[in-house]
Image: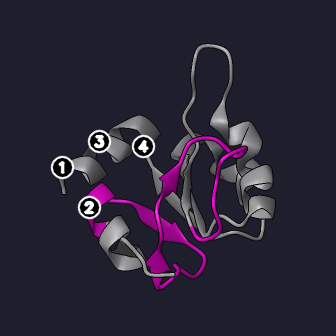
Amino acid sequence: MSGLWTGDELVEAMQARPVGIVPETVTGISIDTRTLQQGEAFFAIKGEQFDGHDYVGAAQKAGASIAVIAEEKLVALGRLHIPLLVVSDVLEAMRKLARA
């Protein structure tokens, strides 16, 4: 499976702070653990009814290679065994990646 981005490209494009070992490649992105594919980055977007941060564990189990989370959630999620990219705003980080 080829990657769309390297982990380092994600860090740079989103101005993220990596926690853990960033994967060499990321195959895509997902905001929904029900459709997430092995190797994709999971973006934990907070919506009006649901908070994607509540599903980072499910994303890990589904095969996410990395999760993009908000700085304010790091303490709660830092014990998971998945590499994290910490940003101030997950939705804005996704926008930055789209512009890169």
What's the amino acid at mark 2? Answer: Ala
Decide: marks 1, 2 in contact (CB < 8 A)?
A: yes
* Nearest-to-viewer mark from 4 and 3: 3
Alpha-carbon distance for marks 4 and 3?
13 Å
Decide: marks 4, 1 in contact (CB < 8 A)?
A: no
Magenta residue check for 19? yes
55 sits to left or right of 32: right
- Magenta residues span 12-39
Q: Position of residue 33 (x, y in %)?
A: 70, 46
Residue in front for this viewpoint, 20 or 4: 4
- Toward the front, the furthest residue is 1
Alpha-carbon distance for marks 1 and 2?
8 Å
Q: Which residue is mark 2?
A: 13
Report helix, strand or loop for mark 3: helix
Report helix, strand or loop for mark 1: helix
Decide: marks 3, 1 in contact (CB < 8 A)?
A: yes
* Nearest-to-viewer mark from 1 and 2: 1
Q: Which mark is residue 88?
A: 4
Q: Position of residue 62 (x, y in %)?
A: 76, 60
Compared with 91, 4 (above or below) is below
What's the amino acid at mark 1? Answer: Arg
Q: Main SS type for the magenta part?
A: loop
Query: Which tag, 4 or 3, sits closer to the chain's start?
Result: 4
Alpha-carbon distance for marks 4 and 2?
14 Å
Q: Which residue is mark 3?
A: 95
What's the amino acid at mark 4? Answer: Ser
Residue in front for this viewpoint, 51 or 62: 62
Q: Which mark is residue 99?
A: 1
Alpha-carbon distance for marks 3 and 1?
6 Å
Query: Which tag, 4 or 2, sits closer to the chain's start?
Result: 2
Query: Which tag, 3 or 2, sits closer to the chain's start?
Result: 2
